[in-house]
């Protein structure tokens, strides 16, 4: 059911309260909350700007909090903090979906809950805050949204993908790198399913993984091999 104008106003007011930022330029806020399906003055340019602002603020925060971490560790931590899944979770925490303006088609498709739209909306909001009040205001909002996540940073090693972890596990034991083979591809062009095999060259041990792309299938196979080797946390 479509929300009323009063509901939308309340959602926007609640959002500003949660963010701790009341917009001086209301047009910027409206644009930040408007999906491209809802009109020509939409939030994609602000999303582009917000992405850059967010990446810098998170990079600076990690640089300060992990003074001895190498560049690779910092990059993995930043990627985990600014990825779509994290941004969509933040959108849920600030009830962003209630304030978003979508076109009729997107509303019917349930896009208000789509992770990509929610993540883009968070970035657009940050871009709008930067335009409205400058870098310090944007930084204050970002650090507020990320406070708990920055206080509970995981280890950088835990963020490595399965293929990297498997290769490092084998190399640490003087063993050869694994090999990956495409086994089969099924399904229509727009929804193909890939199956790949991970083979340990020195032992012939092999497992298969699957996913919606070759890379995803290889990662799944590597994860299953790590489980077999007893090196996955959940194994």
Image (cartoon, rainbow, N blue to C red):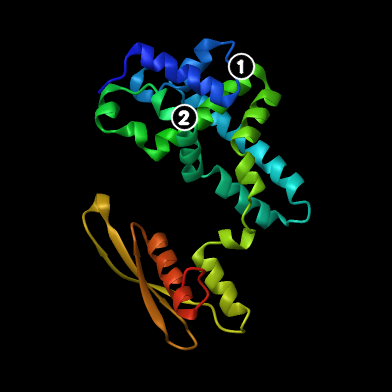
Res. 132 mark: 1
- Is 153 rendered above or below residue 216? above
Res. 207 mark: none
Residue 84 screen position, x and y as percent = 47, 43
- Is 77 rendered above or below residue 84? below
Quadrant, the N terminus: top left
Q: Residue furthest left?
A: 188
Mark 2 vs 1, N-terminal side? 2
Identified at 45% across, 30% down, the residue is 95
Identified at 55% across, 26% down, the residue is 18
Identified at 56% across, 49% down, the residue is 80
| Near-viewer residue (209 or 141) | 141
Res. 121 mark: 2
Label 1: state its secondary structure: helix
Q: Are marks 2 and 1 in contact (CB under 8 Å)?
A: no
Residue 206 screen position, x and y as percent = 39, 81
Residue 98 screen position, x and y as percent = 39, 25
Q: Residues within 10 Å of mark 2 (few under 14, many from 20)?
A: many
The answer to whether any part of residue 229 appears in the image is yes
């Amino acid at each position: 059911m479509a929300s009323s104008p009063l509901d939308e106003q309340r959602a926007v007011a609640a959002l500003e309260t949660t963010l701790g930022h009341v917009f001086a330029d209301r047009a910027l806020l409206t644009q930040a909350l408007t999906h491209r399906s809802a009109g020509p003055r939409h939030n994609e340019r602000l999303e582009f700007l917000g992405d850059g602002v967010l990446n810098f603020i998170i990079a600076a925060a990690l640089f300060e909090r992990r003074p001895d971490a190498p560049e690779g560790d910092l990059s993995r931590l930043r990627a985990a903090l600014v990825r779509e899944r994290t941004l969509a979770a933040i959108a849920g925490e600030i009830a962003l979906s209630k304030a978003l303006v979508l076109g009729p088609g997107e509303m019917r498709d349930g896009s208000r809950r789509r992770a990509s739209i929610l993540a883009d909306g968070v970035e657009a909001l940050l871009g709008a805050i930067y335009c409205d009040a400058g870098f310090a205001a944007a930084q204050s909002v970002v650090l507020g949204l990320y406070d708990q996540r920055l206080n509970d940073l995981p280890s950088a090693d835990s963020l490595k993908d399965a293929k990297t972890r498997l290769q490092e596990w084998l190399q640490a034991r003087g063993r050869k790198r694994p090999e990956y083979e495409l086994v089969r591809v099924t399904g229509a062009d727009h929804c193909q399913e890939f199956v790949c095999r991970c083979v340990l060259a020195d032992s012939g041990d092999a497992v298969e993984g699957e996913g919606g792309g070759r890379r995803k299938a290889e990662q799944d196979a590597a994860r299953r091999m790590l489980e077999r080797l007893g090196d996955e946390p959940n194994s």
